[in-house]
Amino acid sequence: MGPLTAQPKDRSSSPGSVVVVGAGLAGLAAAFQLHQHGLDVVVVEARDRVGGRVRSVRVAGGAVAELGAEWIERDDDALQALAKRLGVPLALAGIDYRRRRAVGSLAASIDEQEAFLVRAAALRSYLDPAEERELTLGRFIDLVPGTNSQRATLRARLQGTFAQDLDLVALRSAGAKGTFDLYPADYYRVAEGNQTLATEMAARLPEVHLGHVVEEVRQDGEQVTVHGALPGASGGAGRFRVEGAAAVMALPAPIVADLAFAPGLVPDQHRAIRELPMGVASKLVVATEESPEPRALQDMEVPFWCYAALGGNDRPREVLTSFAGSPQAQVTLRTATGDPGPWLARLREMNPDLTFRGDPLMAAWAGDPFARGSYSAFDNATVDRIPVLAEPAGRVFFAGEHTAGSWQGTMEGAVRSGQRAAAEVTAFLGRRPG
């Protein structure tokens, strides 16, 4: 098992060495593939754990819950193949991510929601490409024929999904993510928690160093040097330096934007990273006394949704999970205060059949210093810049969900981006896979 350490580690470069910055799914997928190809890999991670925006926890009573990324879809081929390779079993969730029972004023039934989506898909198919290029998701929903309740229910769901004001989200991005798909679908989670994917990859790597906060990436000839701080070092903040023949930056876009690069990134790339909008989302999980019936409920007022789903034994996990996306939801639920009380009160009202036990756990991703948001939310400018986000800069390569094109904002996108970056590094260094 590779060491998970917070000790200073200065390393010199070798012809096949690669520094991977970030131990989320993107960075670990890159490092795992590079290691399989026979390259010398060292991973540095700012957090005191692996997984990044994938974070599994145990609630009162021992049930596993997800405070970060959660859903694995049936066409997430890279993610499912990785889980199989790692020997990590998946569990059918037993609920449909998109088919939610709306609760509150202007709530549309499932049948009404489906009818509206049929019209939305039809309207989008007739759009002129030039017109679609300029439309936001919010403006498009206004154009779809339907009732106020149908329109409001779709807005409530998608505002949470994209974790952003829909008038800022590109319709082109929404269309690529299956937003208007009509068919019922199966969704999965890792039986023992999605973070297991990260811990299993890390365990197969020679070096994964935690508590390493990268500040500068410098290229000089055939060498890349990564500099940073060790905030947890004894006697105050220490320093570290790791050198390699190449580096993979697998960090959220806001963190990459604040790094010092020498030489600097080309202006178009730096601007694309710096101006990329991030979604704002929080999650709350709480244990239940009883085994809850599976459910997917959409609150119409805040908005947020909550759900109870199956675990690895095809029985419901004894936990209720809630996700609130968009700035509006954060203000109403007061997530920035760290007090789950207002949110928990709404969940009790929506789920009168459940009795909660133990303390709830909440994660507000906008306030996370190593994320500064939940995931990317592409506006029209960002869609036009997609190729630039993943473009290598000399010996520095980029991964992360925001570099995954139409897969952005997902675990599948994170894994795909890491594997793509690993392939680019392997080709650049002239190494053959296998």
Image (spheres, grey):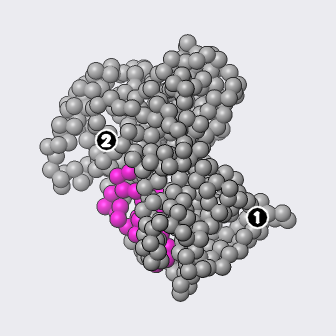
Which numbered disc, 1 or 2, marks the residue closer to the eye? 1
Q: Residue at x 44, y 45 (%)?
A: 80
Task: Give the image quarter of residue 195.
Answer: top right
Q: Is residue 153 magenta?
A: no
Determine whether 384 is above or below 300 in the image. Answer: below
Which residue is farthest bottom?
A: 221
Q: Which mark is residue 7?
A: 1
Q: Position of residue 17 (x, y in %)?
A: 58, 74
* Amino acid type, callout 1: Gln
> Residue at (31%, 61%) from the top-left corner?
384
Residue 393 visible at all: no
User: Whole-Å distance between the Cαs marked 1 and 2?
Assistant: 44 Å
Is residue 398 covered in magenta? yes
Q: Position of residue 1 (x, y in %)?
A: 68, 56
Residue 350's spot in the image, x, y percent? 51, 19
Q: Which mark is residue 178?
A: 2
- Badge 1 density bin: few <14, some 14–19, many ≥20, Cα 10 Å: some
Please report the bounds of the magenta region as a residue range.
383-407
N-term mark: 1 or 2: 1
Give SS at disc 2: loop
